[in-house]
Image: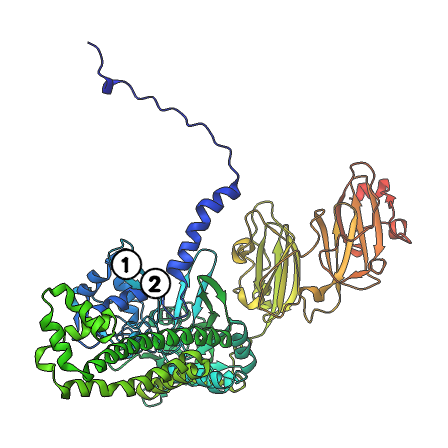
Amino acid sequence: MAKKKNDEPKVYKEHPSVDRRITDTLRENYMPYAMSVIVSRAIPEIDGFKPSHRKLLYTMYKMGLLNGNRTKSANIVGQTMKLNPHGDAAIYETMVRLTRGNEALLTPFVDSKGNFGKVYSRDMAYAAPRYTEAKLDGICAELFRDIDTDAVDFVDNYDGEMKEPTLLPTTFPNILVSANTGIAVGMASNFCGFNLEEVCRTTIECIKNPEHDILSTMPAPDFTTGGELIYDESEMRAIYESGRGSFKVRAKWQYDKKENLIEVTEIPYTTTIEVIIDKIAELVKTGKVREIADVRDETDLSGLKIAIDLKRGTDPEKLMARLMKLTTLQDSFSCNFNVLIGGMPRVLGVQQILEEWTSWRTECVRRRVFFELGKKKDKLHLLLGLRKILLDIDKAIAIIRGTEEDAKVIPNLMEGFDIDQIQAEFIADIRLRNINKEYILKRTQETEALENEIKKLEEIVKSKTKIRNIIVKELEQVIKKYPSERRTHIVRADKVTEFAEEDHIEDYPVLLFMTREGYFKKITPQSWRMSQDHKLKEGDEVVWSIEATNKSEIIFFTSMQQAYKARLYDFDDSKASVLGDYLPAKLGMDEGETPLYALLPGDYKGSMVVAFQNGKAARFSLQSFETKTNRRRLSGAYSDKSPAVGFFFPVDDETEITMFSTANRALTFRAGMLDIKATRSTQGVQTMVLRGKHTVTRACRTEDANLLDQARYRCRSIPSIGALLTEDQLKFE
C-alpha cells in the first residue's frame, strides 16, 4: 500500500547559518525594543505622567467621572483597555497607585472608596476591582481644563478606533509634584514628590525672575509618609542642579514613659512597616539589640503605628539612634530626574525642569488662546452677516419667499446682501419667531464686545509675557484652590546625632590566628590560658598570629590581589578548640580566592613590602588602603604580574627580608633599598636576580629565616643574585 503524502516521515533539516554582525542585530532588534520601553512605558514626560497613567485618567475623564459619581473600578479598568491593551491587572495596579486611599502621591488623582492598600505596607494588599469604586479627584480639573481647546495633540489609539492625547495639559508642574519611578532598558527614572504649593510658588517666582534661588521657596522634597528629612543645603543644591543625588529621611517617633514603649508614627517613603519589623526582630534574635522586649504593628484606620516595647532601664534616645543606623527607620532616597523631552530621555535639574515645563505650558496656553480666538472670529463673522440683515429684514424675507427652489435660497441671500455662504446659511437657519428687530439688535450688539475680545486675544497670542501672566494666574488659583501642608519635616544635618556603632561595642584584648587553609580565630586571653590546643583541619597550620583589641581594624590580603577590610568585632569570640570562621565565606570572597596574609593598619602610617615569585619586591605606603567610604573590598591590592610569596608589615628602612630561590640561593636585603611608591599595584623592583626558570620559593623576615651565617647572604645593593646556601645550611633547612 502506497503511503499518502501526509504519511511520509518528517525530516528536519538544519537551516544554513547566516553570517551577521552583532551590531546589525542590536541595531535592528534590540534598539527598537529598548526605545519602545523608554518612550512608551517607563520614563515620564513633561506632564508628569507615563502612558499608562495618561490612558487611565483620560478614560475616566471621557466616562464623565470628573463631576459624576463613583463607579466600580472594574468598569474603569474595562473601559481603559480600549486605550491600554496590556491587561486588566496592570491597569488596576496603575490605578491603585493614583488613588487617595493608597497614599502613594501627595496629590492623588483618583478619589477612591474601598480598600486600596497602603504604600507603606507590603502585606496590606488592595481589594479586587469588583469591590472598589473610584472617580477622578477634584484636582484633575487642572489636568483637563484645556483638553478640548486644541492645547495638546491627539493621536490614534492602538487599533485606530479612538483618539487619545499625547500629553495632558496640566496647569501646574506635575512632573515635580508626583513621585514617579520607572525602570527602562539601560536607564531608569526616580522622581521624589514635592509639595504642591511650594512647586507652584517656585514656578511663579522663576517665571518672574529666572535668577530666583529655588531653595528659598522649595527647600526640599515632601513625602506622603511624612518623616524627617535630614537637610544638607550643599547636598540638596547639588541634586537640584544635576538631577542626581541622594538624601536621607528618618522616621518620626515618640516615647511613652508610662507604658515604656516607643511609638513610630511616620516612616521613610522608601520602606514599609513589615521590612522595619522584620529587621528589628532579626537584630533581637541575633543578640545585636538586647533592649527590646517586643515589636508589633498597631496600624489602624487612624494611621501608621509601630510599637516597640522596651526593657527596664533602656535609654530610648540611644536605642532609636542605633535602630536608625541598623534598620530602614532611616533610609536614603536616590534621585534620578530622567524625563522625556521631545521623545528623548534627559536627566535635568529642577531649574531645567521648570524651564522646560514653562516653555511647554506656554505653547499649550498659546494654542488654547488661538483656539478661542478662532471660535470668536467665527462668531463675529456670523454676527457681521446678521447685522446686514438688520438693515432690511423685509428684503431678506422677500428673497426667501420669492425663491422657488430650496437650493437657491443660500445663493440668493449671498447675492442680495453681499455675504458669504457661511453667513447666509446662518441667517437662513434662524427660526421664524426670531425674525424680529429686538432679537437681531440683541445679537448684533454683541459685535463690539466681541471685537474687543478678539483684539485682546490677538495681543495675547503675539505676547509671550501675557501668556506667562496667564500661567502665573492659573498657578495662583491652584495654590488657593488646593492648599497643601508639608508632611515631611525638615531637620538640619548638624542637629542630627548619628549613631556610632563603636561607641556601643566593648573593647578588650584578643589574640588572632589565621591558618593556611583560611580559617580565622579571635580568642580572648582568658580562653587562651585555659586551652592552647588548636583544632585544625588535617594538614593545616597557623601561619599568622598577633595580639590586638576587639575594636581594631584588620585587612586580609588574598590570592587574587584583593584586600578585604573588617572590624574584629565583626567576628565572634571563639576558642582554640574550634576551627573558627572560614574567611572566604565570612568575607564573601570570589570562587577559588584564598587569604594569604593579614595586618592591623592602625592609623595607616608607615609602609609594607610584598615579595614576588619573579624576584621582585614592592614597597608602598599603607595610606593607599585608607578609604573615606565604608568599602569592604579593594581590588588591585598589589601587583598581579607574579604570585606573592611574602607580605611584611610594619617595616622601616632597617627591616631585613630574606628571599629563597629554587636555585638554592638566599638573599637578604634592607627594606630601605626599596623606594616607597604611592600606588599599591606597583610591580616593584628586581631584587633577586634569577637565571633560567628559577623562581623565589619564599620570603620572610631575616630573624625568622634561621640562617646560620646571616652576613653571608646580606647584599650591599639590589638587584643581586644572592649567595648559595651552604651544605650546613641545606642540612639545617
> Residue 488: horizontal and vertical position, in percent?
40, 82
In this orientation, which residue lies closer to the viewer: 436 or 625? Answer: 436
* Disc 1: CA contacts within 10 A as few (<14), some (14-19) or many (>=20): many
In the figure, is residue 633 to the left or right of 140? right
Q: Is residue 289 above or below residue 26?
A: below
Q: Residue furthest right?
A: 716
Camera sees residue 253: no
In contact (CB < 8 Å): disc 1 and disc 2: yes
Q: Is residue 418 above or below residue 256?
A: above
Which picture quadrant has residue 296?
Answer: bottom left
Give the SS element for disc 1.
loop
Which picture quadrant has residue 40?
Answer: bottom left
Q: Is residue 595 above or below residue 172?
A: above
In this orientation, which residue lies closer to the viewer: 226 or 666? Answer: 226
Q: Which mark is residue 51?
A: 2
Give the SS element for disc 2.
helix
Amino acid type at circle 1 is Asn
> Residue 303: horizontal and vertical position, in percent?
28, 80
* Disc 2: CA contacts within 10 A as few (<14), some (14-19) or many (>=20): some
Q: Which mark is residue 84?
A: 1
In the figure, is residue 184 to the left or right of 651? left
